[in-house]
Amino acid sequence: MTDSPPTTKLPAQSPPVDPAETEAAGHRAAAAPAGAGRLSWWHGDGGEGAKRNLALIGVLLVLFVIGAATRSDLYANPDWVWANMLSILKLASVVGVVTVGMTFVIIGGGIDLSVGAIVALAGVWCTTVATQSFGAGGMIFTAIVVGIAVGLVNGALIAYGRLVPFIATLAMLVAARGLAAEISDKQTQISQSSVINGIASNDLLGIPLLVYILALVVAGGWVLLNRTTFGRRTVAVGGNPEAARLAGINVKRHTLLLYALSGLCCGIAAIMLTAQATSAQAAMANLYELDAIAAVIIGGTLLSGGRGTIIGSLLGVIIFATITNLFAINGLSTEAQNMVKGGIIVAAVLIQQIQFGSLSQFFRRNRMTTS
Amino acid sequence: MTQHSRRRLLFGGAAIGTGVLLAACTSNEQQTPTEAQTKAADGGGNAEPGKQVTIGFSAPAADHGWIAAITNNAKAQAGAYSDVEFKTVEAGADAAAQRAALSTLISQKPDVIVLLPHDGKELNSFGLEAMQAGIPVVNLDRAFPDAKAYRLQIKGDNYGMGVAAATFIVEQLKAKGVSNPVIAEIAGIDSLELTQERTQGFNDTLAQHGFKVANRRAAEFTVDSGQREASQLLQALPKIDAIWNHDDDQGIGVLAAFSQANRSEFFMVGGAGSKKAMEDIQADNTVLKATVTYSPSMASSAISLARLIGQDRGMSDLVELQVPKEIVLASETITKENASNYLKLGF
């Protein structure tokens, strides 16, 4: 993307930098190959995620400008613009919570295809007549415990049963939806709890409760990934499980916990989605697994594990929600919307492969091989 | 060590307790299958017991209310006849799975097959095969393109649903004197032919009166997709006069989106005719003022007619000695005034 030359040649050309900044960057650059010299934080490895996130924010701004240009009548009203932003965040909230769990699983070297099915199962389970008789507390408890329990089954199959994550969670996708259909007897179950339904309809200080829940889960995920041993172990397990094992990490137990964490996020999402729809059914949260994986990927998390950011994933979810919103306010068809989404996923992965800063090198190499 | 095992015991006990509690939480009130949607098997005419008939039945695995009601109705109607043996096979996830299931059904030599195909075009050749083998096929709702592929076709009127919804909306708007109305539409799964037919009927009828749809979103017949698309529709149109939502099941989510956004300046027409929608219309406390029917009671009728075909009898109220070849149900409009008549048909 940028025109900066390869990082190894940087010190010779870089202008004088603030000593404090170099000091901070020194720690990060310490891991770089010998001879790399001292890099500024921005040009060093640490800026990689931040740069990608800035690019995603740029994409969001572009989408905003497109919206303002195509529906200038709506965007002329600041009240509408604010309400629309909140509407986008609400739209992103449920998938956003699922995506936080998915980010951990993918950084840890796995994948969870069963998230949509877990959301549906937890939603259906927490809206049965028997559960609803326990009130809102019972419903929340049930959804979260079901989510964690299914996640633990996934994790146990993968960590101790040695199943490939793709297959174990694919099987769970089918089975959990089947169980949800069995429990609900294929009917739509209406939530009678005003507390649960209020989660989607109530605001606090002008901001919907759903947005607070998303913010809390994202903040919790960020702290867990970046400021705790659990987070560092996740990166280690995803980056090189054998090295992680030799370093004394209980890789199996950690894998188990990662899928339980994903299940927990699905349980929270199930409550949010049930509140939004004021009901639950076995077919709901359809294809959430693909939405979540797509958001994680365009957020810059490596599908092979070992690297990724929570904020990037969140931005990915918001970008998809903004696209849905953009197509809705312009009255365009869902098919066109899906094609654009597909294009964005491919573009994001291509950029990820090329990597920032080496674009010019990439083109030079290509020219040589094609001529 | 003891500390450790005690903690384990505690966790284990809590886990088992939670499991027992959760298992208890799966119970739902048993949905008694719709007595009213079956035709009582007494009272002379066609109801008189005839020769024993075996009816084979196949419909897609239900993941939403309407299809579930189809299967339940068929089962309940068959149970109401002493001379009908009912054999059902799950149709699985797609047309190929349904074809495989149907071939096991044929080997059981039923007298008649009642079939709601995943896709009428894809299962057309099965209809031909069964008919050639001498087993009459009753096609339920999703038409075979080939007339030789079925003995009887009974289906709802998707185009007519659109017409009925648009007619109601036009009447209401004209009565209110709205000159340039903003009309919105929330469709079901867009790739299905039935969705396109419904939209076609809606657009054609609106166009006759010089109206058109301002914005249209396609949901997926599920409550959460209904909520999602409705909330975006509200963002696109700051003021709306009328909305048609194709499906009452997804309508639960659509209505939730309206109340979450505090919007009620418009009225809505539903589709299909679920019990919940009829109750809402009767109570008259939401924006839902009418729904146009696409009743799953057609499954009960299909079983009754399949029995007559198997017994080589006609419909006792008609002159013909055999059951007709094609029946298209009319799409009716349910409003506050007539909702009580239809409530027994709600699913």
Image (spheres, coloured by chain):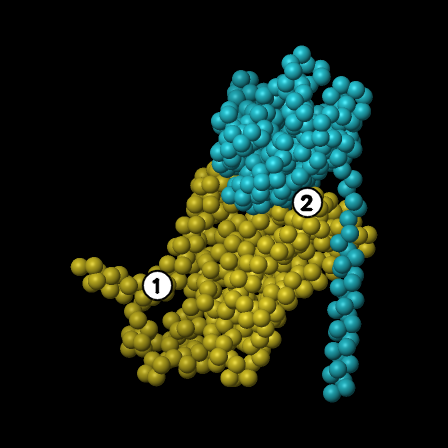
Chain colours: A yellow, B cyan
In x, y percent, where is residue B51?
71, 27
Q: Residue at x 20, y 59 (%)?
A: A370
Label 1 secondary element: helix
Q: Which residue is drawn at 51% across and 48% down?
A: A322
Disc ID at residue B11: none
Q: Are marks 1 and 2 on the same chain?
A: yes
Q: In this view, does A286 lie to the left or right of A302?
A: right
Looking at the rendering, in which quadrant would you find the C terminus of chain B? Answer: top right
Indicate whether A250 appears above or below B65.
below
Q: Is residue B260 visible?
A: no
The quadrant of the image that shows the N terminus of chain B is: bottom right
- Badge 2: chain ID: A
Q: Is residue A65 above or below residue A360?
A: above
Q: Residue at x 57, y 59 (%)?
A: A171
Mark 1 or mark 2: whose residue is earlier in sequence: 2
Q: Name the residue under label 2.
A: A186
Viewer-closest of B88 and B273: B88
| Quarter of the figure with residue B176 | top right
Amino acid residing under circle 2: Lys
Mark 1 chain: A
For the residue pair A64 and A93, the one nearer the viewer reads as A93
Amino acid at the residue labelled 1:
Ile
Res. B230 image quadrant: top right
